[in-house]
Image (spheres, rainbow, N blue to C red):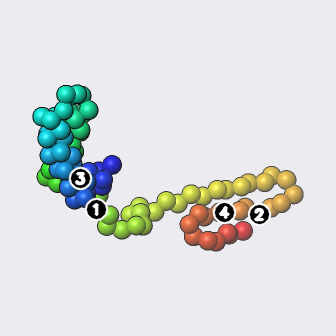
């Protein structure tokens, strides 16, 4: 939604709607429809300048996480098998 309101094409359409709606308000007997157009266009214009004044802070430095997540799963079998299996995620190796 933010990208739509920050778009210059949306601003130009809102300006045309605001000016055209203003003319329509003065020439029309029905005041509800053009007034809705004028108000909607005015909200879009104000939203455009507010969003340009406060830029979004989504700076992505690295796509890889800075902390490494390490999970170990230890399977102990007290039966006939005497081996212990350690599975380390994100390392691609299984040690037996």
Per the image, label 2 sits on a secondary structure element best described as loop
Q: Residue at x 32, y 64 (%)?
A: 60
Among all residues in the image, which is located at the extreme right?
A: 80
Q: Is residue 70 visible?
A: yes
- Which residue is the site of mark 1? 59
Quadrant where the C terminus sits is bottom right
> Marks 1/4: CA distance?
37 Å
- Which residue is the site of mark 2? 83
- Of marks 2 and 1, which one's residue comes earlier in the chain? 1
- Which residue is the site of mark 4? 86
How far across and down, in percent of the image, does residue 36 sit?
A: 24, 33
- Which residue is the site of mark 3? 13
Q: Quadrant of residue 26?
A: top left
* Label 2: few (<14), some (14–19) or many (≥20) C-alpha neighbours in 10 Å: few
* Label 3: few (<14), some (14–19) or many (≥20) C-alpha neighbours in 10 Å: few
Q: Which mark is residue 35?
A: none
Q: Are marks 1 and 4 in contact (CB under 8 Å)?
A: no
Return the residue nearer the eye: 19 or 4.
Answer: 19
Q: Where 91 falls versus 81 (above or below)?
A: below
5 to the left or right of 70: left
> Marks 3/1: CA distance?
30 Å
Q: Tell us which disc is closer to us: 2 or 1.
A: 1
Q: Tell us which disc is closer to us: 4 or 2.
A: 4
> Marks 2/1: CA distance?
47 Å
- Of marks 4 and 3, which one's residue comes earlier in the chain? 3
């Amino acid at each position: 939604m933010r990208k739509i309101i920050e778009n210059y094409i949306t601003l130009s359409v809102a300006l045309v709607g605001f000016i055209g709606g203003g003319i329509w308000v003065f020439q029309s007997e029905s005041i509800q429809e053009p007034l809705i157009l004028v108000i909607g266009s005015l909200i879009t214009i104000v939203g455009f300048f507010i969003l340009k004044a406060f830029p979004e802070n989504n700076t992505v430095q690295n796509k890889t996480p800075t902390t490494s997540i390490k999970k170990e799963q230890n399977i102990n079998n007290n039966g006939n098998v005497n081996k212990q299996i350690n599975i380390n995620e994100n390392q691609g190796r299984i040690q037996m």
